[in-house]
Amino acid sequence: MTEATNGMRAAVDGFGARTVVVLGDLIADEYLFGKPTRISREAPVVILRFAEREVLLGGGANAAHNVCALGARAIPIGVIGRDGAGEELVALLHAAGIPTDGVVSEAGRTTTVKTRIMAGGYQATRQQVVRLDREPAGELSPTTEDALLGRLTALAARADAILVSDYGYGTVTPRVFERVKTVARRANAIVTVDSRYQLPRFGGATAATPNEAELEQLTGMPVDDERSVEKAGRQLLERLDARVLLVTRGSRGMALFERDGATTFVPIHGTDEIADVTGAGDTVISTFTLALACRAAPAVAAALANVAGGIVVMKRGTATVSRAELRQALGLRGEP
């Protein structure tokens, strides 16, 4: 067994002893499935006959679900509305065995719901036709922000890692992130960040996981080849004052940048014939965070995250990767 494989096995073996607080935007991923029947007389659109509805944990809730599926203890902290979607999210967390002590409800706030309309016949693959997003309006109330700060201080005091999942819906305010860094220093915990739109404001984290398009947008530099990716990655790593930067590159794998100067390009795991990328970033940062929390070398953590990402994109819908699946993919089947 190679040294790298030994490192990955040691990290996976350690997942069960770790606690990860997942702070961020909790989202309900709703799927409505229908079968095409005819063209509407009202407009040139296909009419779908409703078949079924499925709701899954999305956003920060999906990251927490991935942490849990990998065998660690996940503690989500976030905000929901006092509405049906919020109740459904809490029920889904309970069903997955994930505690909800950190979930704050705010009257008058809309729980974030992403509704995907999926169409497909009996023999055809279901395809996403359109997505409808219901989003909260406005900032958190001062009372809600104070409640988040209180839960963060209490629930993250003994965490091994704090994973920040920012989808741009206002949960992780500047005050909340400052408290994240304070609590992490006290607990000697790592802080990892996945931010869809505002990564630069999360400076001082241990690690961040932007994708290649975000890297290009944040640096204003082209990322056409490995040389240009490395130049942009180094600039962003310095700007964030982070220890590690893991850039996901789709079918081209990943690029890992470490503060000490090491750069590693990781080829894609598996095939580039993917089924669905929904939530894949949540799987990547969850695996990466857990491995770093197990004191794995960044290159080992990146390799594990790459394998997990390669597994999850072969699944349809918002999905997770289990520790058993990770072991099997690494050829560690039968290990404890």
Image (cartoon, grey):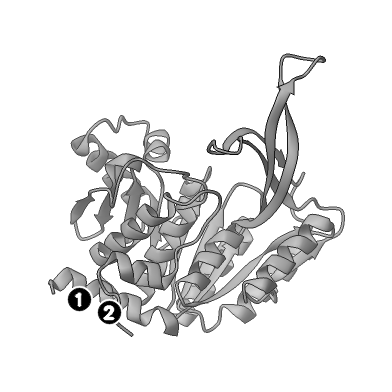
Q: Residue 243 carries which label?
A: none
**Is 7 on the left or on the right of 57, as rendered?**
left
Q: Is 238 located above or below residue 251 in the figure? A: below
Q: x and y percent of residue 276 in the render? A: 47, 44
Q: x and y percent of residue 223 in the render? A: 29, 33
Residue 171 seen in the figure = no
Q: Dot 2 corresponds to which residue?
A: 10
Q: Which residue lies furthest to the front in this view?
A: 123
Q: Dot 1 corresponds to which residue?
A: 6
Element on which disc 2 rests: helix
Query: Residue 206's image quarter?
Result: bottom left
Q: Is 307 located above or below residue 271 in the figure? A: below
Front in this rendered view, residue 60 or 55: 55
Front in this rendered view, residue 223 or 61: 61
User: Which image quadrant: the N terminus?
Assistant: bottom left
Element on which disc 1 rests: helix
Indicate the amino acid at tag 1: Asn
Q: x and y percent of residue 76 in the render? A: 61, 69
Indicate the amino acid at tag 2: Ala
At 86% from the left edge and 59% from the top edge, which residue is drawn? Answer: 107
Query: Residue 148's image quarter?
Result: bottom right
Q: Which residue lies furthest to the left in this view?
A: 2
Q: x and y percent of residue 179 in the render? A: 58, 69
**Is 336 on the left or on the right of 225, as rendered?**
right
Crowding around mark 1 (Cα neighbors within 10 Å: few <14, some 14 to 19, many 20+) is few
At 42% from the left edge and 50% from the top edge, which residue is drawn? Answer: 314
Between marks 2 and 1, how big is the CA–CA gap?
A: 6 Å
Kindly indicate whether the residue at mark 1 contacts the one at mark 2 (C-beta within 8 angstroms): yes
Front in this rendered view, residue 93 or 151: 93
Q: Is 247 located above or below residue 308 in the figure? A: above
